[in-house]
Amino acid sequence: MMQYKGYLSHIEFDDEANIFHGEVINIRDVITFQGSSVDELKKALEESVEDYLAFCTERGEEPNLPFSGQLTLKLSPEQHRKIILAAENSGKDINSWVSEVLAQAVH
């Protein structure tokens, strides 16, 4: 994984084309880049992010910013109640409890 200005990327190697290609993963818009070496890949990521930001400015649009770390959930009242109780029973506030449970789920 590489990052530039908070934009995180996922990188894969295409052994048929003998090239690395990457995609920014923490925004909704699509930013891709490629290179045949680590240095080329880093430079391509930087250039692609800068091109994206310039393109948004040109169009008068706000660029997608890297995810903020805030997550809004819609739950049933019963699910909400159960989560509050589970957090209280563990001795944690709801944000800490949910963060820990989600971290465990993605590992």
Image: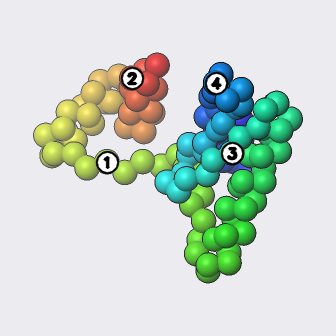
Left or right: 102 in relation to 89: right
Gap in angstroms between the C-alphas marked 1 and 3:
32 Å
**Label 3: how many Cα within 10 Å (few below 14, some 14–19, many 20+):** many
Please state which of the two labelled residues, at mark 4 or mark 1, is closer to the viewer.
4
Left or right: 45 in relation to 70: right
Gap in angstroms between the C-alphas marked 3 and 2:
30 Å
SS of the residue under disc 3: strand
Amino acid identity at mark 4: Glu
- The residue singled out by tag 3 in the image is 33
Which comes sooner in the sequence, label 2 or label 4?
4
- The residue singled out by tag 1 in the image is 73
Gap in angstroms between the C-alphas marked 2 and 4:
34 Å
**Label 2: how many Cα within 10 Å (few below 14, some 14–19, many 20+):** few
Which comes sooner in the sequence, label 1 or label 2?
1
- The residue singled out by tag 2 in the image is 105
Please state which of the two labelled residues, at mark 1 or mark 3, is closer to the viewer.
3
